[in-house]
Amino acid sequence: MQTVDETAAPAARRRTPRPRADALRNRERIVAAAREMFVEFGPEVPLDDVARRAGVGNATLYRNFPDRAALTHEVVLAVTSRTTDRAEEAVAAESDPFAALSRFVHAAADERIGALCPMLSGVFDKDHPDLLAERRRLEEAVEGLVRRAMTAGRLRTDIAVGDVLVALSQLTRPLPGTACLDIDRFAHRHLQLFLDGLETPARSVLPGSAATLEDMRRRS
């Protein structure tokens, strides 16, 4: 007679079943819809409207995200992670370090990184380990882009990583309530002007001091 491993049985019962493919797709649609609506109308957009944009029922949204804080957490995590992926892709695609930095800046705008600012002022755990890990990953990726461009003599030396991140956030940050779907048309123009100002030789002397990652962390 075949014996049953009594120690394995409880572990098998405790094993969490994998989400179904359709459930994962619904979750992804909700996060994507929330990201777009947070950009258009701000992070206080009604969650029922997010569900409608995602094409799911309210019950599906709340089953995945029981409150606004949980949904905001997931959107911030997704935007940060995707933006870091764009930085890594830029390094792989461009042999010129400044071209890689430029590619990343425009790609980060497409990921709606500027929408993070109003979201980060919301009520959720900004020090959650997942968020801190993704933020460090993004900072390291951008720091690498800046360092390579500066080492190659393609980037002015009186700036720091924080200058890039602050400008990127400010130039791509939407105005909530304006339904600014055309912001890309202006954001990419202004980002290119910013990038032209970063390239060597420098055409001016910058006032103040460079913004470092430490500066940004103290202000967040």
Image (cartoon, rainbow, N blue to C red):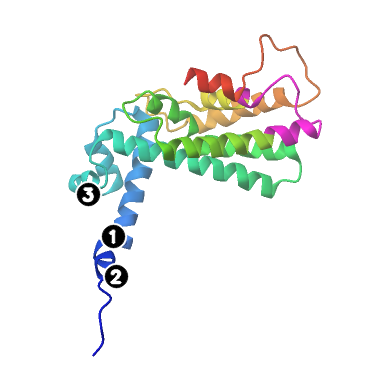
Q: Among all residues in the image, which is located at the extreme top?
A: 207
Q: Is residue 40 magenta?
A: no
| Residue type of the residue flagged with mark 1 | Thr
| Residue 4, x across and y down, in percent | 25, 79
Mark 1 falls on what kind of element? loop
| Contact? badges 1 and 3 (CB < 8 Å) | no
Task: Provide the residue designation for mark 2.
Answer: 8
Q: Which residue is found at the position 78% from the left and 17% from the top?
A: 203
Estimate the spatial distance between the alpha carbons at disc 2 and disc 1, rounded to whole Å.
Answer: 14 Å
Estimate the spatial distance between the alpha carbons at disc 1 and disc 3, rounded to whole Å.
Answer: 19 Å
- Specify the quadrant of the image occupied by residue 9: bottom left
Task: Provide the residue designation for mark 3.
Answer: 60
Judged left or right of residue 205, residue 143 is: left
Crowd rating for badge 2 (residues with CA inside 10 Å; few <14, some 14–19, many 20+): few
| Residue 87, x across and y down, in percent | 60, 41
- How many numbered tags mark residues here? 3
| Residue 115, x across and y down, in percent | 44, 30
Task: Provide the residue designation for mark 1.
Answer: 16
| Residue type of the residue flagged with mark 3 | Thr
